[in-house]
């Protein structure tokens, strides 16, 4: 890792520790060139591409997924941690698929499953935004199933 202060090419690691519940490794580095210290963070690179309905691809982004789900949770007095946990579960499910590309609709399905267990209203909101119900009757049937 190149030193950000003097561009020395060979900095050394003086400390490594887990952060983020073991999902991130934080390394403290020291530059033998200028003596400055800085940190780097190592995370699992999923490099799974999400294929959207219009065919565009973008890298799977857990934080973006959290943001999308969180919008559906507005005024539901839910904790953002619960939504983050759903996103982590989805990330693990996707990585277990062993694929390099996944349809956005699959991630949408996983998100709905997670939200359904968390909060019915958030689930319905999310589902209606993502238009995964093929028609209004299907959505109505699902709402009746939940309230019944
Ligand atoms: Zn340096």
Image (tube, rainbow, N blue to C red):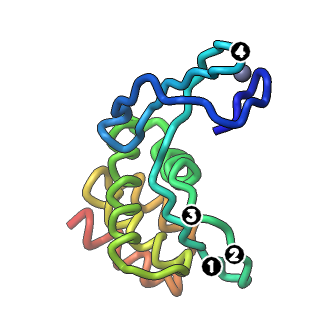
Asked whether the beta carbons under mark 1 and mark 3 sit within 8 Å of each other, the answer is no
> Disc 2 marks which residue?
57
Mark 4 Cβ inside 8 Å of ligand 1: yes
Residue beneath label 3, please? 60
Q: Nearer the viewer, residue 130 or 120?
A: 130
Task: Give the left or right position of residue 1, taking residue 91 as reference.
Answer: right
Q: Nearer the viewer, mark 4 or mark 2?
A: 4
* Marks 2 & 3, CB-CB < 8 Å contact: no
Give the spatial CA distance, label 4 vs label 1: 45 Å
Q: Which residue is mark 4?
A: 34
Front position among marks 4 and 3:
4
The residue shown at (41%, 54%) is 87
Residue 58 position by quadrant: bottom right
Q: Residues within 10 Å of mark 3 (few under 14, many from 20)?
A: many
Quadrant in the picture for the N terminus: top right
Nearer-N-terminus badge (1/3) = 1
Q: Residues within 10 Å of mark 1 (few under 14, many from 20)?
A: some
Disc 2 and disc 1: Cα gap in Å?
A: 5 Å
Give the vertical position of 122 relative to 8 (above or below): below
Q: What is the x, y in percent for residue 2?
A: 70, 36
* Ligand 1 positioned in quadrant: top right
Image location of residue 25, percent across then percent down: 41, 38
Residue at the image position 53 percent from the left and 85 percent from the top:
135
| Earlier sequence position, callout 4 versus callout 3 | 4
Q: Residue at x 47, y 71 (%)?
A: 107
Give the residue drawn at x 51%, y 58%: 45
Badges 4 and 2: C-beta atoms under 8 Å apart?
A: no
Is residue 78 at all visible to an observer of this figure?
no
């Amino acid at each position: 890792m190149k030193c950000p202060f003097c561009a020395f090419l060979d900095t050394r690691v003086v400390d490594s520790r887990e952060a983020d519940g073991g999902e991130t490794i934080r390394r403290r580095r020291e530059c033998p060139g200028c003596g400055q210290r800085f940190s780097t963070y190592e995370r699992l690179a999923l490099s799974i591409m999400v294929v959207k309905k219009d065919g565009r691809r973008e890298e799977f982004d857990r934080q973006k997924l959290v943001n999308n789900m969180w919008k559906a949770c507005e005024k539901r007095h839910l904790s953002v941690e619960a939504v983050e946990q759903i996103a982590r579960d989805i990330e693990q499910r996707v990585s277990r698929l062993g694929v390099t590309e996944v349809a956005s609709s699959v991630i949408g399905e996983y998100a709905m499953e997670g939200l359904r267990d968390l909060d019915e209203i958030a689930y319905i909101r999310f589902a209606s935004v993502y238009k995964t119900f093929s028609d209004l009757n299907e959505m109505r049937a699902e709402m009746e199933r939940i309230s019944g």
